[in-house]
Image (spheres, grey):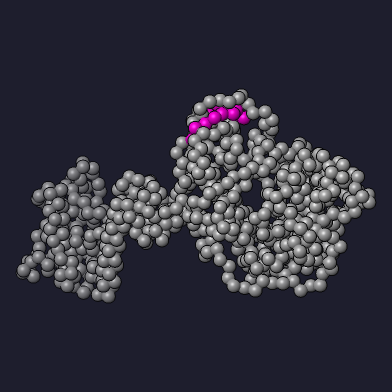
Amino acid sequence: MFVLFEEAGKHLAGRILSEADSSLQVELDSGKRVKVKSANALLKFEKPAPADFVAAAQKLSSDIDLELAWEFASEDEFDFSDLARDYFSADPAKPATLEQQAAALFRLFDAPHYFRRSGKGRFKKAPFEILQLALAAIEKKKQLGLQITAWATDLAQGTCPEAIREQLYKILFKPDKNSAEYKAVVEASKTTHVAPLDLLQQSGAISSPYQFHYKRFLFENFPKGTGFPQLEAPVHTEQLPLADVQAFSIDDSATTEIDDALSVKGIGSGTVTLGIHIAAPGLAIQPGSPVDVLGRARLSTVYMPGYKLTMLPDEVVQNYTLMAGRNCPAVSLYVTLDEATCDIKGTSTRLELVSIAANLRHDVLDSIFNEAFFAATENAAASADIAWATELIYLHKLAKHLKSQREVARGKPENFNRPDYNFKLDNPSGEEPRGNERVTITTRQRGAPLDLIVAEAMILANSTWGQWLAEHGVPGIYRSQASLAPGVKVRMGTKALPHAGLGVPSYAWSTSPLRRYTDLVNQWQIIACVKHGRTAALVAPFKPKDTELFSIISGFDAAYSAYNAYQNGIERYWTLKYLQQNSMTELTATAFKDNLVRADDLPLALPATGALGLPRGAKVRIRLGEIDEITLDVTGAVLERLDVVSPGLGQDEATEDDDDTSAGPIAIAVDLSEPAELPTTSS
């Protein structure tokens, strides 16, 4: 005797070995023996064998018309044998065969949209309205499955459907794995055995490598677009005194957000006053205002070769940038110095209008104000005919003094062994690059004289104002580093803690309020201190332990990291483009980590076959491999060793930016490790 029974949502059949009042001992075809509750035993039969019986019933089950069965079914709860009798038997008094009963059981069980289960072998037909909704959903799923298959076929044949093109970046980087577009890419990728990124590129979804990188960045960081809404740029209404100074800025020619300027008075008198003047949008932009909301949403200007996305709307920037020929509102730090020793005698902070006499430009003046110039200008007459030379000579002397003091506190000198690189595209100024422009890459040694002047002045301002805020009990946003030990990173917080890397007791970013939101926040706090003195903590926009400050820090950290990562990646793109445009197939490079080498004359790090095991600093000539503009990948092979160890390789060089290689492929979120669940194309 055999039995058909239900176990864990499945129908099984086997030979009955023994039977008790409430259970049966059953042997399956596999030889496994199971204990079955009597209530779960649905049919007993003598022949055929269980496997044959189930197979025959399943075949017969597929012929049952569900719509007709639903019509036949009772409105009340019923047993599967009742439906089998009504459906198969011409004589209502004659029961259906066991095979027909099993077929009805299987068909009912597999059609929950027509029949709801009410117990073991018992069912109740679905209400008409519910059935229609279920059938519509099944048809929709069927059509969706057909659409996915059609899209996947198009992709496999080299054509990208528009729906997938529109979802390209979402599919690759933040996919909804239940979406039809994502499933079509997965299906096509599995069918063609081509990686999703390559498949989409081959199908024309990615028409421009540059646009791929740029639009991916916008997708992740500017999902609502890069435009600013129409608004009126705020204007400060306070009556500010005009400072008795003539200030000048030092920036690149492409800089439009001029945040800082310098002035010098008293040269030759024994006491010199250095003025560090910072653009003051914080006088007009109020926390919570529409412009503040825009700045807080972006948190920083995004820089890239030939283009930028500013933190603030251009009309706001133009109101407060320190443009030559204007009297500009500024937060000014005045530092009184002993002219001979450059020692600081005192500081003061003022809110005022500052006359900007000139906007000096690095790229124009670096060749004039170089190390040789400052070495030769101990004789003041040598520079008498050069504008701003007298001020710059003193500022360079002061900058070297400030740097040497920081290095004492730091415990070791700062080494600038690698240059900075400037990228220039031949695209019209302010116009978004297309990605095929001619690119020029030039070097600029870190710590060049004009750089040093500006850098030391800004460090002095940020450190002085950081301490000043702390003395007033007013919180700010600080950058700190506990020590120079390996692995100790710079952190952001609200307390005035030492910055070991800079060698200063505290450091609060305050000198770029047009470009960084943290600086705008700190400017609000500084303005409160200027206006209210020791009571500033009571009226400053942000109070001690203000949760908003921590929220700003968290958001800024994430955004700034993302922006820097994009800048590094897109600079790598233009570096690879430079190699192609100049038909460069070989480079001289320096080994620095594992099998990685860094090009000597370009901002490029890459893996090189044959570099593994070379000592850090070894010079090599490498042959470049194929360039992939999508993954930003390029490899090399060592052709020859040029020397043993590069001289002058300091500890800073050995550790600085070792992880910033950008040598690996970009991360794609399409997961092919498991097959995607695809809608069925048949009912």
Rendered residue at 37%/61% (across/down): 163
* Quarter of the figure with residue 334: bottom right
Tell me if residue 661 can be seen.
Answer: yes
x 16%, y 68%: residue? 69
Tell me if residue 493 is in the magenta stretch.
no
Residue drawn at x 68%, y 41% is 445
Q: Which residues are magenta?
A: 611-624
Compared with residue 286, is residue 511 higher up or lower down, i.e. above or below? above
Q: Quadrant of residue 310?
A: bottom right
Residue sitting at the far right: 269
Residue at horizontal 76 percent and vertical 37 percent from the top: 413
**Residue 543: x percent and y percent?**
74, 64
Instruction: Judge left or right: residue 100 versus residue 21.
Output: left
Instruction: Please name whichever residue, 167 or 534, is drawn nearer the observer in this view of the structure.
Output: 167
Q: Which corner quadrant holds the C terminus? A: bottom left
Q: Please give left or right for residue 46 compared with residue 196 in the image.
A: left
> Can residue 101 be seen from the camera position used here?
no
Q: Position of residue 17 (x, y in %)?
A: 18, 45
